[in-house]
Image (cartoon, coloured by chain):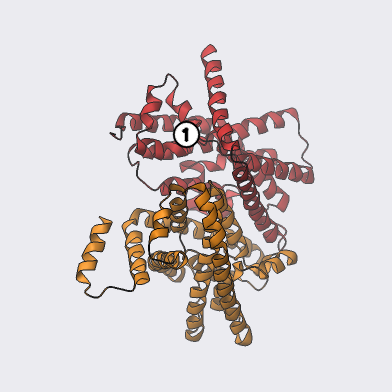
Amino acid sequence: MHYFLRHTRLYVKLLFLHLRSHLEYNLDFLIGALSSLLGQAASLIFIWAVFSRIPKVQGWTIWEVAFLYGMATIPRGMAEVFMNGSWAMRRLVSSGDFDRLLLRPVPIILQIVTQRFNVTGLTDIAVGASVLGVSASHLGISWNLIDCVFLLVVLVCGMGIIGVVNIATNSLAFWHPDDTGAFQVFVVRFMNLAQYPVTIYGQVLQIFLCWIVPYAFVGYFPALVLLRKNIDHAWLGWFSPVVLIGVSLITSLIWRRGLRHYESAGH
Amino acid sequence: MLSQTSLQIAKIRPVPLPKYASLVLASMERAIAYRKSTLLNLAANAVWITALYYFWSAILSEYTIIDGYDWTKMQTYVVVSYGVNALFSLQFELQMFRAIRNGEIALDLIRPYDYQTSHLAKATGAALVDGVFVGATIASVGVFIMDIYLPAPGTAAVFLVSIVLGFLIKFLISYITGLFCFWTVSSMGLVRTRIAVTNLLSGALIPIEFFPSGLQSIAEFSPFPAAVYTPVSIYLGNLAGGDLWTAIGVQVIWVIALWYVARLLWKPAVRVLVVQGG
């Protein structure tokens, strides 16, 4: 317990350090927030434009799709705020700065995760929460205690899945520090698809989103539970925590192999 | 590696190319050298086309025809709009931003090139390589796997002209975004906004007819549809006779207008850059 508390404190401290350096640039904060708002607006307008022509897509109404969109967007924002640091891996490894992290008496993964703090994540969280709230009230969802706890748990698990997958892909830096990072971006962009009902995309992409990069467990499956959708696989919504644990185990294997492979940049 | 090939080419070539043409060539070599990124780009394109394909297939199997788009026409829209949109890779845009951030731009400013024209030359090189790779894949997927239709020869010729104009508009939009990056240190936000707005308003995600009417008129008075939606509409045969030439004329006007807007922004942008110290 003491161990856990100490590291939580460290995590918060390190994260705030990066937040402070961020807030130094007021204009950038504004541009970031504005850009994330516009990006969200574009996606929402896309949903609106599609549903202004048709009442339902595969049994999904506009408010159900919006609900799912909100449920997937909040953890996305949370991951950008709380677990965004792995994107600094390439720079750290190729410049040799990674050595410094190895010397400090703080777990390396904690230092990596707190390397970056993306303020635009805050706008994503706000937009996601508003969309979720508005669509829930339109759908007349009555929240009982279990629903609320479930929502909180799956949001945190969703953040975990996104963040841990990013750590796994960015561990590639141990082997190829000079890559452009295109692969990491390629993987994370699948989250754009997982913000909508994944059954729409056809077999191959569905299998990919459920079992290879399991982004479907971020928003889609949990949303089925809260929407009380009568779909066979709705029960999978309860398994987000299990998926998070699985992804974490695989990632820790990759991470350890990577650390063993790491040789300093040599300057 | 890269400079070596350039040197070899320089040796083989007895007469020096005009300076911007050699920039186009260098940028093409660069794009070919980064084969892995190009392949990943291709994979990403494949994913997006597949996703959009199934998305519209799900909708149109329920509703058969929306706003004049049946399944064949929608498939054609998805494939052609994605192909046109893919002509300008993100990779290049980020290179431009990186040069601003790490100070490489100081060198760019010393070189005896016009900054705007030299960027156009580099973008053209990258687009030519992307065009061959992405265009060939998308065209073969579209024709052999999907069920898209081909335009009449006359339409095809106008379509090609319209693509070139659309490419120029897209280049200028991102170049102007690039100039705005002179004012800020974190350009990713700007790039993201640019991509989100362009994708939506240019019709790369969804035909502009589908927009609610308010948004449709906003889009029509912006340069974005001229980048993607116009060439695709020409391909689909939505525009004919007078409308066709008006659309091309609008594209030409946007190219000229944006070119001079970029020129106007250049001076204040450089002044800010000097204050930042490169």
Image coordinates for residue B58, horizontal then vertical, percent? 60, 59
Left or right: residue A8 versus residue B110 is right
The foreground one among B62 and A263 is A263
The image quarter in which residue A139 lies: top right
Q: Quadrant of the N terminus of chain A?
A: top right
The image quarter in which residue A154 lies: top right
Q: Give the mark count.
A: 1
- Amino acid beneath label 1: Val
Q: Quadrant of the C terminus of chain A?
A: top left
Image coordinates for residue A74, horizontal then vertical, percent? 63, 40
Whether residue B122 is visible here, answered yes or no, is yes
**Shown colour of chain A:** red
The foreground one among A21 and B137 is A21
Image coordinates for residue A156, horizontal then vertical, percent? 60, 32
**Shown colour of chain B:** orange
Image coordinates for residue B120, horizontal then vertical, percent? 45, 67
